C-alpha cells in the first residue's frame, strides 16, 4: 500500500492548492475546458460564493508521498435538506463533488473520506457528484467524452464511472444534453405550429431588455421557480445567488438570445441561451495573462462565431400539460435559432441538461431533430 493521505484544507492557500489539482490532473485531456482561475477560486471561496450562506463544505486533498494526487469536496445544503425526499434531496442527504484523482485507489480513499465527513455531520445518504450546487455542475459525465462540454457543463475522464460505481454507487438520475445543427430549419410540422402561434394575438414572444436587467431577471426567476418547483433535484435559489449569478452571466447576455413568452400580457415562459464561452476559454487555456484577457474581451464584446447552449427553459406549471406550452417553446427556440445563425455565425446548439424522465422536454428536443450528445449521471448511496 502506498503512502496515501487525505487532508482537509481551508484558507486561501488550501483553496488554491485544491483548485490547482484540477488543472494538473486534467491538462492533458483534449476535451477538458480550463476555467478561468479567478472563477474557479471564487466557487470554493466562502466569502464570494453565496452557496456557503446555506451550506457546510469541507475540501480534501489526497497526497501520495507528499505529492498532490487528488481532491474532493464534501458538503450538504441546508436548503436541500428541507426539500421533499421524493424530489431527490431531503433530510439526511449530503453530497460530494469536484472529484479528481490519478487512480482508483485514490478515488476510493477520497470518496471514503467524504462519506466519513458526511456521516459525522448526520447525513445518511449521498447524491454525487454535485459541485457544489445542483445549479452549477451536477453529475458525472458517462456518455459523450469525445467532445468538449459547452459553457456551464462539466467534463470527466471515462474511467471515473467505473471507479465511482466500484464504491457502491448506483444511478439515481440521468441528465441529458441534446445537440442540434441550428443551421437546419425545423420539420414542417414544427414550422406550422410556430406559424399558428404567430397568428395568435394573445401570444407575444419578446427578447429581454438588458437596460431593465434586474426587472427581467426577477421575471425569469419567478417563472423558473414556478416551472421547476416540483422537479427532481430542485432547490430554490436565494436572492444573493440570483444576484451573484446575474452578475457573472451579464457579460454573456444578449437580448436576442433570451426570450420571454407572454400570454394575454402575462409572462408565462422563458428560454435562456448563452454563447458558448468554453470555445475561447480553450483557446486561451484558462489564462487571462499575458494575452488571454484581450482575446476573451474581444470575443465577449462580439461573440462570433459562437455556438449556443440553452441552460434554462421553463413554462408556468399550470400550462405544462397543454399544447400551448409546446407551442411557446417551439416559437422561442425558433426565434433564437434564427438570431444565433444570422448574428453570431452559430452552427451547433445544445439544449440541456434535461432529466431523463422529463417527457415533455425530451419530446420537444426530439421533435426538432436534436440528438442526445452527452449524459451525466447523478449517483446515490446509503451511508
Image (cartoon, helix red, strand yellow):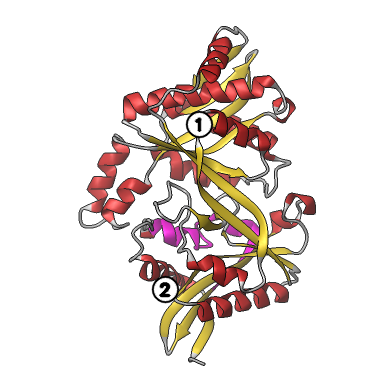
Q: Position of residue 138 (x, y in %)?
A: 57, 55
Q: Which residues are magenta?
A: 38-59
Of 243 and 66, nearer the camera is 66
Residue at (67, 46) in percent of width and height? 236
Query: Which quadrant would residue 271 be assigned to in this image?
Result: top right
Q: Residue at x 59, y 56 (%)?
A: 377
Compared to residue 72, the image places residue 181 above or below, namely: above
Label 2: few (<14), some (14–19) or many (≥20) C-alpha neighbours in 10 Å: some
Q: Is residue 8 visible?
A: no
Is 55 colored magenta in this rendering? yes
Q: Could you say which disc has been placed on residue 369 in the image?
A: 1
Frontmost residue, 147 versus 238: 147
Residue 17, label in figure: 2
Q: Secondary structure at mark 1?
A: loop
Mark 2 → mark 1, Cα distance in angstroms: 44 Å
Dot 1 alpha-carbon crowd within 10 angstroms: few under 14, some 14 to 19, many 20 or more: some
Amino acid at each position: 500500500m502506498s503512502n496515501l493521505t487525505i487532508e482537509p484544507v481551508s484558507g486561501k492557500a488550501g483553496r488554491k492548492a485544491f483548485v490547482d489539482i484540477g488543472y494538473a490532473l486534467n491538462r492533458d485531456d483534449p476535451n477538458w475546458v480550463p476555467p478561468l482561475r479567478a472563477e474557479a477560486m471564487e466557487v470554493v471561496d466562502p466569502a464570494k460564493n453565496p452557496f456557503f450562506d446555506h451550506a457546510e463544505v469541507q475540501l480534501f486533498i489526497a497526497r501520495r508521498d507528499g505529492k498532490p494526487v487528488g481532491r474532493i469536496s464534501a458538503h450538504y445544503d441546508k436548503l436541500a435538506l428541507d426539500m421533499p425526499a421524493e424530489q431527490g434531496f431531503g433530510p439526511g442527504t449530503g453530497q460530494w463533488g469536484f472529484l479528481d484523482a490519478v487512480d482508483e485507489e485514490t478515488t476510493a480513499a477520497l470518496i471514503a473520506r467524504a462519506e466519513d465527513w458526511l456521516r459525522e455531520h448526520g447525513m445518511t445518504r449521498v447524491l454525487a457528484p454535485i459541485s457544489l450546487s445542483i445549479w452549477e455542475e451536477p453529475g458525472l459525465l458517462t456518455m459523450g467524452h469525445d467532445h468538449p462540454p459547452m459553457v456551464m457543463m462539466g467534463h470527466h475522464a471515462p474511467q471515473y464511472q467505473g471507479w465511482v460505481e466500484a464504491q457502491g454507487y448506483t444511478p439515481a438520475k440521468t441528465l441529458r444534453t441534446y445537440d442540434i445543427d441550428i443551421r437546419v430549419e425545423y420539420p414542417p410540422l414544427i414550422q406550422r405550429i410556430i406559424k399558428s402561434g404567430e397568428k395568435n394575438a394573445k401570444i407575444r414572444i419578446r427578447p429581454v431588455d438588458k437596460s431593465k436587467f434586474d426587472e427581467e431577471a426577477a421575471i425569469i426567476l419567478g417563472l423558473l421557480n414556478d416551472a421547476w418547483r416540483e422537479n427532481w433535484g430542485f432547490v430554490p435559489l436565494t436572492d444573493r445567488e440570483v444576484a451573484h449569478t446575474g452578475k457573472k452571466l451579464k457579460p454573456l447576455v444578449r437580448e436576442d438570445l433570451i426570450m420571454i413568452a407572454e400570454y394575454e400580457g402575462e409572462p408565462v415562459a422563458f428560454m435562456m441561451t448563452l454563447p458558448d464561452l468554453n470555445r475561447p476559454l480553450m483557446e486561451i487555456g484558462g489564462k487571462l495573462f499575458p494575452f488571454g484577457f484581450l482575446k476573451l474581451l474581444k470575443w465577449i464584446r462580439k461573440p462570433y462565431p459562437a455556438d449556443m447552449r440553452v441552460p434554462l427553459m421553463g413554462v408556468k406549471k399550470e400550462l405544462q400539460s397543454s399544447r400551448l406550452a409546446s407551442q411557446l417553446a417551439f416559437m422561442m427556440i425558433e426565434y433564437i435559432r434564427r438570431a444565433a445563425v444570422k448574428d453570431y455565425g452559430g452552427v451547433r446548439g445544445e439544449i440541456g441538461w434535461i432529466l431523463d424522465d422529463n417527457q415533455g422536454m425530451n419530446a420537444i428536443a426530439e421533435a426538432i431533430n436534436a440528438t442526445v450528445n452527452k449524459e451525466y449521471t447523478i449517483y446515490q448511496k446509503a451511508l
